[in-house]
Amino acid sequence: MDFLTLTIGKQKNIALIAHDQKKHELIEWCEAHKEILKGHFLCGTGTTARMITEATGLPVKGYNSGPLGGDQQIGAKIVEGRVDFVIFFSDPLTAQPHDTDVKALLRIAQVYDIPIANNKATADFLITSPLMSEEYEHNVVNFHQNIRERASTL
């Protein structure tokens, strides 16, 4: 079996992340979609999580700040099956000192077939999708089989 079918539950585990120049935009977005977000488990990188909670009252579990490993922590939660949806308002016009961490997070979200929005328009489409209130099955690479096959060839 090359793929495993995983299920994203009705209650989503949503990571909220924003570069500095996009934090206020993400906070406004969270406020606009507060009623939907209240039904899901929220987490985020340190400063962003704190700012969202203070501004909206939504409970957001905070990890480290992005440049201090927060992006990597959220990537690890994706691998563990504990984050299954990412809203990341990135700033394409400003160089980021932790750009390699951001790329690693985006890559792992792709590998695990996780919905990810990098801007407000995409986030609006995702959060208003009928799939937000349903279970969703998706296929990911069968990593255990992949490891067995690689180990047998080395």
Image (cartoon, helix red, strand yellow):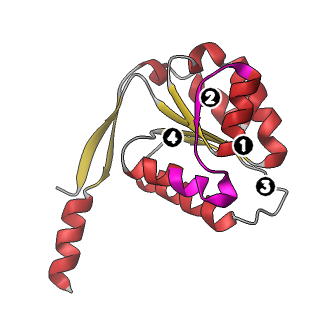
Position of residue 76 relative to residue 18, above or below, is below
Q: Is residue 64 magenta?
A: yes
Q: Residue furthest bottom?
A: 154
> Which residue is tagged 4?
115
Lower sequence index among marks 2 and 1: 1
Q: How many callouts does the rendering have?
A: 4
Real-space CA distance between mark 2 and mark 3, rounded to the nearest whole angstrom: 20 Å
Start-end of magenta stretch: 56-73
Real-space CA distance between mark 1 and mark 3, rounded to the nearest whole angstrom: 19 Å
Q: Nearer the viewer, residue 69 or 104?
A: 69
Q: Is residue 29 left or right of residue 64?
A: right
Real-space CA distance between mark 3 and mark 4, rounded to the nearest whole angstrom: 19 Å
SS state under label 4: loop
Which residue is rendered at x = 71% and y = 30% of the image?
Answer: 52
Which residue is rendered at x = 62% and y = 50% of the image?
Answer: 64
Which numbered circle lies on residue 47?
Answer: 1
